[in-house]
Structure formats: structure tokens, C-alpha cells
Amino acid sequence: MKLTIISGKGFNEPSVFWAENLLREARRQKQIPAGQIPAACVLDPDGDIVSYLIKNGLCHVDPHWACYHSTLYNAWFGGLNFGIVGCAVGASYAVLLAEQMFVSGCELLISITSAGIIQTPAKETKFILIESALRDEGTSYHYLPADQTAALNPVLKQKLINSFAGNALMVEVGRSWTTDAPYRETKTAIELAKTQGVISVEMEAAALYAFAMAKNKKVICYAHLTNTMGQDGQDFEKGIENGSVDSLSIILHTAKTIVSH
């Protein structure tokens, strides 16, 4: 049988290569002390949140993070201690980090990324809680069979929906399109995404949700609607401090909602 991206995966088999083993060797080689990273962690694909935290003295490099490919910052905001990695762009990199975070002490992972607008949400809000994602990338097919939907855990989804009701944070629930090729968002592909009820397009959610479903982990993805894929002037504007304050408020609310219930 020819090996393709949707076949020959052995979904019920354990992997031969474990994140634990990679991190063990990284600690040995880099002389990193044993220890846990914060229980709540954040992926910041744009890197703007990390930049804001550094600029304001709200974080420091975590001494226990042993990843070869990234720097994790231990941060404080609004009484919440969390770990955060900036510039975590793309499905495969996001899941590589997620795998390593969850074996390093993470219990809840929040991803918040800027996203293109496919269809304007009903209330024209800027943040979307991604409830499910169109799987147009490669990573998710290594975790979840092709006929399954990559989606937010329904219990987490309902908790968050209830928490946002009447809250000052303007967040809507919606579907996203996760692509590996942002410069191949053709008119045909966009029109197809619209027929699937998609609101936004980004690069991580489908893979992160597939990972979460396969490994039974708590992962929550948000899309910050910031652009129309460069079609209009004044595009990619995120707001005050490049949207960092608003994003941090959503991260804080999300972590407290999930941890306190």
C-alpha cells in the first residue's frame, strides 16, 4: 500500500519516539535542572504577547524548559502564572511544543493567534473561540483519522460559552480553517471554506485539537480576527499594544474559568 498522509498511521499504537526521551537528553546535554513548567501555558504565534510581557517586566525565561527549538517564558498577569512560547507558527511546530509542554508540567494549553476573516461573525467581534477546524494541514492526520472532526472538547466549550455570556470580553464561537499554506488561499479554496461554515483562517487549531483528542489533553484555541489576507488597506491591525492586552485578558479569563471548575 502506498503511504499517504491519511493512511498507514497506526492510530492505536504508541509512538516509538517520545517527547519525554527528547527532553531527557536535552536536559542532560544543556544541563537543565529538573522541574515543572507552569500548569497553564500559552502559544503566541505572532509573538506580540511575549514582546509585551518582556517590555513590561512581566516574565522571565523558565529555567526548566528543555525544548531544543524554543524559549518558554514564565509570566505573571492578573494573578495568573503561566508559561508562554512566542512565534509558535504552524501546525507541526505548535503540536511539537504541545507534546513537550504536557510532559513538562502543563495541564491546560491556550493558543491565541491572529487570523484572516473568511466570513464576518454575527456580532462582528474580534475574537473567536474555535469550536472546530477544517483540516487543511498535515499534522492532524497523524493523530486523528481523516473522517473525524478536529474539535474543542465539548465540556470545555460549554464552560467557556457560559462564562462569556454577559461578560465584557467580546468572544463568539465559530469554526476555523487551518491551512499549512497561507499563500495558497485561493478564491476557490475560500469559497469552499465558506460552504463549511468557516469564519476564520489560521495555521494551528486543527492540529492542536486533533492532538488534544488523541491524547486527552485540555487545549483551547482562539482566533484574533485581524485581517482580510492583505486585501484592504490598514490590514493586520490588532489594537492597543498589538492586541496583547486584550489577548491577555482572554487568556486570564479562560484559565480561571477552566481551572476553577
Image (spheres, rainbow, N blue to C red):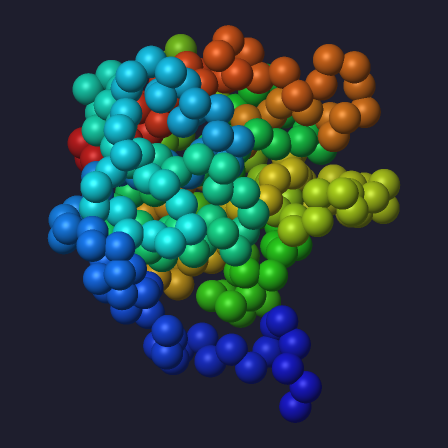
Q: Quadrant of the C terminus?
A: top left
Residue lying at the far bottom of the rendered structure: 1
Question: Relative to residue 146, is residue 81 drawn left or right?
Answer: left
Residue 59 image offset from top left, x and y in percent: 28, 25
Res. 119 in view = no
Which residue occupies 21% across, 41% down? 63
Residue 52 image offset from top left, x and y in percent: 41, 18
- Compare residues 169 and 4 and report the one nearer the observer: 4
Residue 115 image offset from top left, x and y in percent: 61, 32
Residue lying at the far right of the rendered structure: 187
The image quarter containing residue 95 is bottom left
Question: Relative to residue 66, is residue 182 drawn left or right?
Answer: right
- Compare residues 57 and 170 and report the one nearer the observer: 57
In this rendering, is residue 135 above or below 158?
below
Residue 184 image offset from top left, x and y in percent: 78, 46
Which residue occupies 54% across, 43% down? 89
Res. 2 in view = yes
The number of discs equals: 0
Question: Relative to residue 41, is residue 225 drawn left or right?
Answer: right
Question: Relative to residue 197, is residue 261 drawn left or right?
Answer: left
- Compare residues 2 and 104 and report the one nearer the observer: 104
Q: Quadrant of the N terminus?
A: bottom right
Which residue occupies 63% across, 16% down? 237
In this rendering, is residue 94 above or below 77?
below
In this rendering, is residue 66 above or below 224?
below
